[in-house]
Image (spheres, helix red, strand yellow):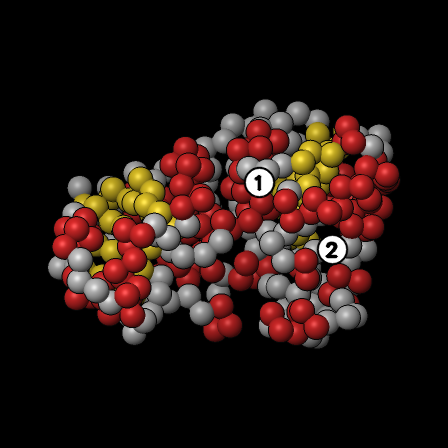
Amino acid sequence: MRNVLIIREGSFGDLILTLPVVQSLKKNNFCVYLAGKGIYKNFFEIYSDINGFYSFDNTFFLPLFSGERNQLLSEFLNNFDLIIFYEDEKTLQGKTLRKIFKGEILFHPVKNEHLKMHIIDYLLLPVRKFSREIEKYPFLKIENKEENIIVIHPGSGCSHKNYKKENFFEIIKKIKDKEFKVILGPAEFDQFQWWNNKIGQERILKTSSLQDIVDITKTTKIYIGNDSGITHLFAASGVKTIAIFGPTSPFIWGPRGKNIKIIFREVGCNPCSKEKMKNCKAKLCFEQIEIKDIINFIENF
């Protein structure tokens, strides 16, 4: 059985979107190890199919970024038969890796502005060389009891990708006969008092860890959120997911799964660059999304 190391720098959502690469290689009898940000290590070791996770931001990997030859790192890397590195081989870490690793390396850089297909399909391109069976849906090992709870997450890692909190509140008013909760992560803690005044503290779930989110996922019937890593978590757990996209493209970054509904309105200027997204005042992409469309999705899920 061949050992493969996948190096994928990026956010939590980026790693979830990389899981089909792991799953496809595993179905073809590879032992698959993932290297990414260390803060996600426990989550992916528990809830994904990887054989192990390495913290790529650990000082152990520092020689890759400094261009130094390091015997311990070289010996570690040469335990693998194949490395898939989602970076350019012209970078310093790419050049260093080429020098110290004796096995096969596949460089497959992710340049967001040049993507012409869904990110999962793009990430899978180098895998097709080794895998007869390809998995296109991320999967997390989280059991869902599907209690009658609708969960709303009004935030994301970027405020410019967020549907207005006032609109989320309007959704809640339309589903007032149903059980609901609102997730506020660290990025949304400043909204706590606003939500407390609107729905009461008992309806708010303040979360400070990914395990908090996992616990919520287990009892969620329908999840509603923005383009975020948390949305990808719920989708990959099999929860019925409604994802709201505005300035970013769901055709590239949308969650994938059997229980996904995506709301997106093309308005001529979206999807747009990070700079345009940051400076946009009109937010037409979000203004064109009507509350009734989201309610219709909820009622027909």
Which amino acid, by three-letter code, is at mark 2? Answer: Tyr
Q: Nearer the viewer, residue 10 or 111?
A: 10
Return the x and y of residue 124 as percentages of the image width and height: 37, 57
Which amino acid, by three-letter code, is at mark 1? Answer: Phe
Specify few, some or many for label 1: CA neighbours under 10 Å numbering under 14, 14-19, or 20 or more: many
Residue lying at 45% horizontally and 37% vertically, measured from the top left:
43
Q: Nearer the viewer, residue 92 or 272?
A: 92
At mark 1, the secondary structure is helix
Residue 234 bears which disc, if any? 1
Residue lying at 75% horizontally and 61% vertically, measured from the top left:
286
Relative to residue 107, is residue 253 drawn left or right? right
Residue 163 bears which disc, if any? 2
76 lies above or below 128: above
21 lies above or below 269: above
Residue lying at 57% horizontally and 55% vertically, measured from the top left:
254
Return the x and y of residue 202 as percentages of the image width and height: 77, 28
Q: Earlier in the sequence, mark 2 or mark 1?
A: 2
